[in-house]
Image: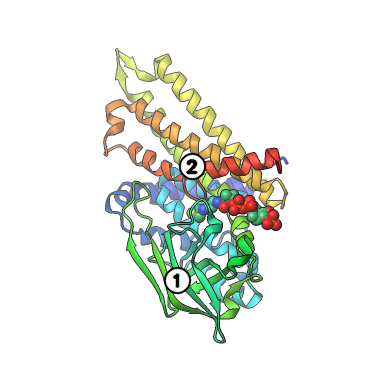
Amino acid sequence: MAYELSEEQEALRAQIQQMAVEKVAPRAAEIDREGDFPWDMQKLLAENELLGLSIPEEYGGSGASLLSNCIVAEELARACATTSLIFVVQKLAAYPIVLAGSEEIKQKYLPPLARGEVLAAFCLTERGAGSDAAATKTTAVETDDGYLLNGEKCFITNGSIADTFSTFTMTDIDRGVRGISAFVVEKEFPGFSVGPVEDKMGLRGAQVSEVKFEDCLVPKENMLGERGSGFITAMKTLDSSRPLVGAQAVGIAQGALDVAVGWAREREQFGSSIGKLQGIQFMLADMKTRVEAARQLVYRSATLCDNNDPELSLFSAMSKLFASDMAMSVTADAVQVLGGYGYMKDQPLERMMRDAKVTQIYEGTNQVQRVVVARRLLGKL
Ligand code: COS
């Protein structure tokens, strides 16, 4: 399926680029160093109506295409991956509500998320259910007053600062993946609590923590979709979010390439700029080619999503896989172009390299993406 960026999308890119250069990039090193959540960046995204970009207009958002969302994620990540993640997670965590929530639930929870007044979190992963998402142990038991949730989710981005939690639980263990049901949970619900914030390699400003449910009472109407439809909702949500992780990876790699090109022009060795050396030229040429190839795959997968194409799962997995592996190697090459300077914390490249790493891991490791691709290729054996 072909795509072309519209004039509106080019204008959106220019707008985000300018905002990223003027307001986001100057904060990136500090956010990484301090490791606190950058509320100023959250406010900036909310003021520019970006936190509701993916939410349908009838619930207060802009209803923009996934392709437009990818452009925003990419341009933010080019300057600061943590800021890009604020944008990406709002879409990820709101999507189960968009996809499966009743009209009342959508009207209740989506408008404040679209306005960026509150943040959301996506609670799927557990200590014993990472790649094997169907192995979820958090239970939801039906009572007269609602569902009682018990269990723990881990590595939850925004866990300690979100208000709205899209949560996946086991309601019917004997039904396997068809026994998983999704709920929207509020932080104020009794029995809900969060653990300490994790100390991470990268994306240092993102607040990642455990989320706990101890006899947490959730109203019946907060179930998202039919009982037992939670796993499919989670998979569909990830299908439509993995292109955004790919876009984030493209942005991080583009940011690293920008720095490496600037350095190759300015840095002098052996009597002239190192950009005149073929060894450096070939590295930069390969980096540029791989960034562009990943960008095309990401935009294509976003277009498939926007058109409800049945190939979405396959392309979504391939785009996230290819773009994140590319970002890891391009950021490492960019460090190499700067040599010893690239290894120092006063240059942004070591941060970009650390930030790139998680794009190979979150929203499904790249090994899981390969499983998805291989299953599509081979069918049932
Ligand atoms: N869209 C719709 N339905 C899907 C689907 C998708 N993308 N993927 C799977 N399903 C359906 C299957 O069709 C199957 O339905 P039937 O029972 O009717 O045949 C059901 O869901 C179970 O699928 P499958 O057998 O493939 O499930 P597995 O337990 O083998 O898990 C993987 C598949 C590994 C792909 C899945 O667990 C996964 O994506 N894991 C990674 C989780 C992840 O990304 N975690 C990060 C959390 S967010 S940071």
N-terminal-most mark, 1 or 2:
1
- Which residue in the structure is indicated by mark 1? 163
Residue at position x 61%, y 55% from top?
235
Name the residue at 48% across, 58% down. Answer: 125
Please provide percent x and percent y for residue 95.
Answer: 58, 62
Q: Amino acid at mark 1?
A: Asp
Find numbered disc 1 in the image and state the secondary structure of the residue it sits on. Answer: loop
Tag 1–tag 2 contact (CB < 8 Å) = no
Q: Is residue 190 above or below residue 316?
A: below
**Which residue is found at the position 60% from the left and 75% from the top?**
105
Q: Position of residue 8 (x, y in %)?
A: 62, 50
Circle 2 — which element? helix
Instruction: Find residue 249 and name its label.
Output: 2
Neighbours of disc 2 within 10 Å: few (<14), some (14-19), many (20+):
many
- Please identify the residue farthest to the front as the structure is shown: 174
Residue 62: x percent and y percent? 60, 62
Pick whichever, 271 or 93, lies toward us. Answer: 93
Res 367 label: none
Residue 109 in view (yes/no) = yes
Task: Determine the residue positioned at 34% across, 46% down.
Answer: 201
Q: Quarter holding the C terminus?
A: top right
Quarter that holds the N terminus: top right
